[in-house]
Image (spheres, helix red, strand yellow):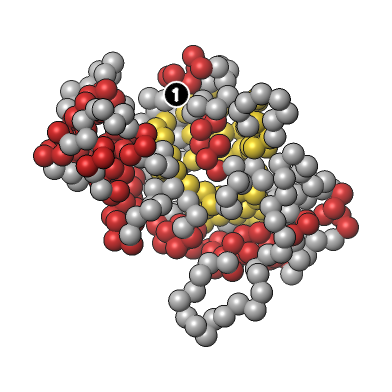
Amino acid sequence: MIPALAIEGLTAFAPGRGAKPMIVADLSLDIWPGELLGIVGESGSGKTTLARAAIGLIRAASGRIAVDGEVLPDLSERSFRRLRRRVALIFQNPAGSFNPRLSVKAILKEALRGLESSRTPAALLDMVGLDAGLLERFPHALSGGQARRVAVARALAADPAVIIADEPTAGLDVSAQGETMNLLTELRDRRGVAVVCITHNLPIVRHCCDRIAVMYLGRIVETGPARTMTAAPLHPYTAALLAAEPAPDPARRRTGPPVLGEVPSLYTRPAGCEFHPRCPRAAERCRTEAPTVRDLGQARTVRCHYPLEAA
């Protein structure tokens, strides 16, 4: 099977002038047709930068990107223009990504412009379960859930192979979160589109995603099937993220933080394993030698010298 989106050795720096820290560090990841992949990690781990660099909204310094097996000739803006019809990004703040002066109808018409498509704005709304009566509304008159569905409808205009949703449940109540994830799951099931869900919401990825990729300081440190990985994490950082998840049971009180210290500065990345200053299992080797990705079988990979499975 050919990946819907293949990212190989992608490196991206923070935009701007002067000394710029590396946000995404030599990252490789395959997204497969018809899968729902969750990407998780602390704030500042590079999740959003990865999404933006993968479609050229942030200029990557190096790397290789292929869509449905077609490799982009380079990382120039010209190359990414074609890719953006096959890979769509739903922004973290959907309402903020709309032109406030345009109605929903005009926003969707703009998305359809230049495409050889017979779809109408009303048809796009119908695909995401919204009534055509919303076409004359402006972004400020949409609820959070409606704004996200309109953003999904706009993403579907070009019939993409991959939809990248950045924090699709942020700011929504539990009911709207479930409706949003159900919509993305239905699109995956009905249309075969690959969906990448970038989120802090661990219950969402556990119950909705097929596979999870964990990011730390711009690198993928662990990947694996969602249920297996959340039940038995291999990387100490993954275990710490899961341990930090709030539990509604008062009997399950934590005696201390699941991981010590703060995320290191991107300007001064630690030598060796970048997680070693915070890792309770760090040994001398971790301080001097950077780990490589290890394939442990059963669709699981980990970037760690001493994965938890070996304990």
Residue depicted at x 47% and y 51%? 199
Going by the image, does 191 lie left or right of 79? left
* Residue 89 can be seen, yes or no: yes
Residue where numbered disc 1 is placed: 83
Instruction: In the rendered view, tell whether residue 273 sits above or below residue 14.
Output: below
Circle 1 SS class: helix
Q: Quadrant of residue 193?
A: top left
183, 175: nearer the viewer = 175
Instruction: In the rendered view, tell whether residue 243 sits above or below residue 179.
Output: below
Taking the view exactly as shown, the residue that stands out farthest to the left is: 133
Q: Residues within 10 Å of mark 1 (few under 14, many from 20)?
A: many
Residue 264 image offset from top left, x and y in percent? 72, 49
* Residue 233 can be seen, yes or no: no
Q: Quadrant of residue 110?
A: top left
- In the image, what residue type sits under mark 1? Leu
Going by the image, does 26 lie left or right of 230? right
Residue 303 image offset from top left, x and y in percent? 70, 51
Residue 79 image offset from top left, x and y in percent? 50, 17
